Image (tube, rainbow, N blue to C red):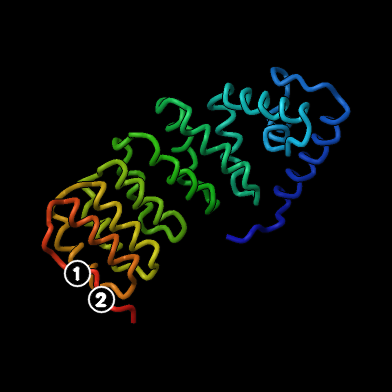
Amino acid sequence: MMWKPTIRNCLLAATLALTRMHAVADDFDPSTASLENLLFHAQRYGNTAEKRMRKKAAQEELFARKTEALAYLMEHIDIDNMWIQILAYQLVVKLDKEDAVPVLLGFIDDPNDRKRKSAVYFLGFKDAPEHAERVAALLGDDSAGGAAVRTLGKWKAVDYLEDVAQFLTHDKERWRVLAANALRDIGDKRAIPYLREAEKDQYFTVRKAAERARRSLGDENGGSSTRPIS
């Protein structure tokens, strides 16, 4: 998705710019800093020892604020800022399931495509198959559908095996690869016929993913991934 200079994005950029000005002038105390200030220092280029110390302290404090920080990062994850995405991922990994999952579930129905997609993707890093129905509802989402396939695979959501298998014929090559990998993760032998058929795909990436998934399910003599690219 291309970044668009919406009013909210412009306001955030202005806020971060003001934070930058104050951060340079004032002493930085991470324990009392705002989330905006912490984010500025957490992503700041550490070209001096002082900046590197502030960066480390800001990241530690950001992670210490747990759900508050994750909600803040998710609220702004549609901004064209790689560090927001990196910090959100790191925080999701660090947090306990009980802390991370409720925050992420709060964004899977968000009207913003990137927030929705990111939330569904991050859910795959937590073992929360009890929420598979909510994630499966996004399989038809043009933005979050691929992430939903991946997460259902990570959760070994066997009840949605056939829904995931349908993505082996999706228009997007990348989503077909995601489907093959998800079926491998689910680990149910009922996926083998779908995977054999996918080994006839015109793209090597799909064929290889399908073959690897099929073999992982114990089918060593199924289809072939030697079909030439057309």
Q: How many marks?
A: 2
Disc 2 vs disc 1: Cβ atoms closer than 8 Å?
yes
Does residue 176 sit above or below 213 in this rendering? below
Q: Is residue 130 left or right of residue 89?
A: left
Q: State the residue position of label 2.
A: 227
Mark 2 to mark 1 CA distance (whole Å)? 7 Å
Please report the residue visible at 31 percent of the width from the left and 46 percent of the height from the top.
152
Front residue of 2 and 176: 176
- Residue 184 appears at what percent x and percent y? 24, 51
* Element marked by disc 1: loop
Front residue of 118 and 221: 221
Seen from this angle, which residue lies furthest bottom?
230
- Residue 39 appears at what percent x and percent y? 68, 34
Of the 4 image quadrants, the one containing the N terminus is: bottom right
Please report the residue visible at 43 percent of the width from the left and 45 percent of the height from the top.
120
Q: Amino acid at mark 1?
A: Ser
Q: State the residue position of label 1.
A: 224
Does residue 168 sit above or below 230 in this rendering? above
- Residue 175 appears at what percent x and percent y? 37, 61
- Residue 166 appears at what percent x and percent y? 26, 62
Q: Is residue 113 left or right of residue 174?
A: right
Front residue of 154 and 138: 154
Of the 4 image quadrants, the one containing the C terminus is: bottom left
Please report the residue visible at 27 percent of the width from the left and 56 percent of the height from the top.
164
Q: Is residue 217 left or right of residue 50?
A: left
Does residue 96 sit above or below 148 in this rendering? above
Instruction: Kindly indicate the quadrant of the structure image that contains residue 124.
Output: top left
Answer few, some or many: residues within 10 Å of disc 2's Cα (few below 14, many 20 plus, some between 14 and 19). few
